[in-house]
Amino acid sequence: MRNRPPSILSRAAKRDDRAPEPIPSSHSISSEGLAALLGIPVETTTVSVSEGTVTGLPAVQAGIDMIAHAVAAMMTDARVFDPEGEPSATVPPVVARPTVLLGSFEYWVQVVDTLIKRGNYVGILADFDPDGYAQQVVPVHPDSVSLDDSSGIPFYTIGAATFRWDEVLHIRHGAPTGSLWGCGIVERYRQHLKEQLAQSEYGRTSFQSGGVPSAHVQLDKATVTQGETDDVDARWSTKFGNGVRKPLVTGKAISITPLSWSPHDAEFIESRRVSVAMAALMCGLDPADLGASIGGAGLTYANLTDRQLSRILQSFMPWTRLLEEAWSDMIPGAGMVKGDPEALLRSSTLERFQVYTSGKALGIYTTDELRAKERRPELDEPEPEPEPMQDPDIEEDNEP
């Protein structure tokens, strides 16, 4: 795959009946067009919920990254198996490195990140081999794709070009029944994401923009004029100000509450902790995976391997299955593409060898298979022992 000239990319036409066209640049814009397509109401608000703003929420992006990195690790080590379940000696380029423009791990991370956020991954089948199988899948951002299934057969418009359903790879998640367009967390959890963005904006206003005054200056008079207020403000800020927060200047006739965080502000801080747990649930993770909890239930300690196995089964494998099925359709024959979950199970040396010993005793593994798991070369075949030489005199004595 690495020896293929990266500049040679035949487009999705299988018989070169379409001239090459540039792939539209990928960009992130508001997802309100997608919401309209799915019939999801979009409320008018000062806080915009889009792929870009959701990426700016640390807890949400941390959950997405955890899943994307894990699935990418499994797919980077993916293997191809024949219908009988035997591993193939070679891995097709479309599996080993789906596009020459990106590394394998980088590519799979992008696929999963897009699937989680937008519910759709679209790529143009390209670089066909002599048998007509695509050797590359060139990614396209969902905002650059228009799907038309009004005729019963999907057609995809990307830029100025239109592609049939069998000329692109489209993976979807969260699609409503009867729909061919998926729905990601940006749309599915729009209301809660709006609340998280509003919390972030509240915190920015309170801490960065000086929502709480730096001090309360009370003049020895019942009322003060605007000029007196500005004068005290300027003199205080010159000597003690921090550049953003300003003092509060009043007269004795005005009653001021203490300048401290109110119970409402304390509730805001607690809500930020809850938002981390909700971000984990949106991504399909256990809140404890992001160091959060709901209802006072904290992180329970367990064997590291067991906990990682639980994540693989419940959080990572559903996304891995989507990729395995999609890529299995692009390899010759009836083979199957399988990600490698063992890439995530980094057990201790003692635990591994205990499993190896039991497996070999039961006849599950051979010595060479176990050495391959430990990335060790196969043992050389031992030289046959020479047959013992017979003394001719002894042979004569043994004759009848």
Image (spheres, rainbow, N blue to C red):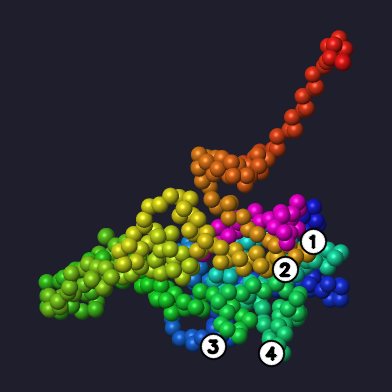
Q: Secondary structure at mark 2?
A: loop
Report how far apart the C-alphas of labels 4 and 1 lie in the structure: 36 Å
In the rendered image, the vertical position of residue 225 relative to residue 87, given as above or below = below
Magenta stretch, residue numbers: 64-92
> Looking at the picture, how far across and down is residue 180, in whole percent?
63, 81
Q: Is residue 300 left or right of residue 146?
A: left
Tell me which label, 1 or 2, sits earlier in the chain: 1
User: Rounded to the nearest whole Å, what is the CA distance between mark 2 and mark 4?
Assistant: 25 Å
Residue 329 - label: 2
Q: For numbered disc 3, what is the local secondary structure? A: loop
Asked if one can make out residue 33 in the rendered structure from this viewpoint, the answer is: no
Answer whether labels 4 and 3 touch (C-beta < 8 Å).
Answer: no
Amino acid type of the residue that numbered disc 2 sits on in the rendered structure: Asp
Residue occupying the point 70% across, 37% down? 378
Q: Which residue does the numbered mark 3 point to in the structure image?
A: 39
| Residue 7's disc number | 1
Q: Is residue 21 magenta?
A: no
Callout 1: 10 Å neighbours few (<14), some, many (20+)?
A: few
